[in-house]
Image (spheres, rainbow, N blue to C red):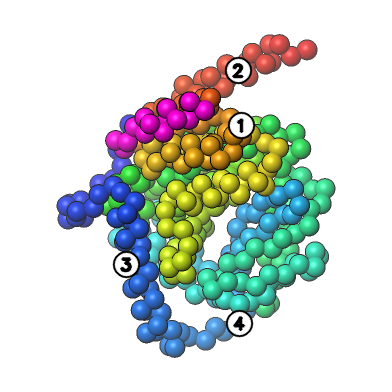
Amino acid sequence: MLNLPEAPRALRRMPFRDDLPMKRGLLRLLARTGRRLESAFGPFEPVRAGPPVIEVYLGYATPDHWIARGRVLSRLKRPQARHGQGPWRNLLQMLSLFLTDEVAEVTVTAPAHGVSAITDEEGYFNLLIPQSDARGWAEVAVEAEGAHARLPVQIPNPRARMAVVSDIDDTVIATGAWNLPRNLWTTLTGNIQSRHVFPDAVELLARLSEAGRNPVFFVSSSPWNLHAFLEGLFARAGLVRAPLFLRDLGIGELQEGPTSHGEHKGGVIDRLMAANPGLPFWLVGDTGQHDAAIYAAVAARHPGRVRRVTLRRAGRAAEAGAVAELRAQGIPVDLLDDYGPLLSELAEKKRELRATAP
């Protein structure tokens, strides 16, 4: 089992417990602090010079539209990490990703499609592009106040046999998300060079994707501020290219929107199932943050749509009740220390198919 980096002793002694109410309480505290800072320092923000920039997110498709996504900022922050870089420098670079200068109420247009959208208070936008016959990856050219970008959109293959949804923390990358101090320390003091991506996760998602035939989606409660970091980390590790669905931890959402990890993840999967109505779903997660319970609730809301659930053991949580609930619904569940046995099973099935092929 992988040994994660330990948080400093003083942080480990802090009275955090592994429960969602504690985490939600911390986020609400940060939100209140943020509102006060914005109120106090908002009038002194520098005036933007020159055009803004468009942060590119990978989009996805529904039966009716492509959904091209992004965020408009005054500038992009892309700190360059070096091998052997110390944790405190990593911390400063990671914190800089959260000090965004978003550009609200800007019109983003896709001229070739005659479509536009206005950025929200955090700079985010979605463009609904009418469907076409494109397959694989398409690009949508957009512009906003002199800024230009091309937004990739994943278009499902008509021969797709399923869709795959994967969690990120402790499913794909080692984080220790079940333990809040360790989670914060690992997330904030690592960099693209030092964070560990599980090689078996890279191989499993590549196998399930079938060379792009089946669409893959990543869903996490990590904030959108980490999008570029995660994309860089995934690219370095060779993970399958796929849209990310992260969480807006801006002040507006913490004040009014969903407050739980489960509500966010379950809601995204609901949207993806609606976007891919003809496909069954293979859900991949871990036992550290109640993924089994989230997936069981999804399966109950969408009978017959969940083909299989694969969970990596993480932390002390066994989630026996939720796993039993999934199996009672007739859904196969893998509960594994690593994906080796499942990879062997998939390889054997592939050999059998080849042997019986005409």
**Amino acid, disc 3:** Leu
Question: Which SS does the magenta portion mostly show?
Answer: helix
Q: Which mark is residue 50?
A: 4
| Residues at circles 2 and 3 in contact by the CB criterion of under 8 Å | no
Upstream in sequence: badge 4 or badge 2:
4
State yes or no: residue 319 in magenta. yes
Is residue 159 among what the camera can see? Answer: yes
Left or right: residue 321 versus residue 88 is right
Q: Tell me how far mark 4 sits from mark 1, CA to CA.
A: 52 Å
Upstream in sequence: badge 3 or badge 1:
3
**Amino acid, disc 4:** Gly
Upstream in sequence: badge 1 or badge 2:
1
Q: Residues within 10 Å of mark 3 (few under 14, many from 20)?
A: few
Residue 63 picture location, percent across and down: 74, 48
Please give the range of residues in magenta.
315-329
Q: Nearer the viewer, residue 163 or 332?
A: 332
Q: Tell me how far mark 2 sits from mark 3, CA to CA.
A: 51 Å
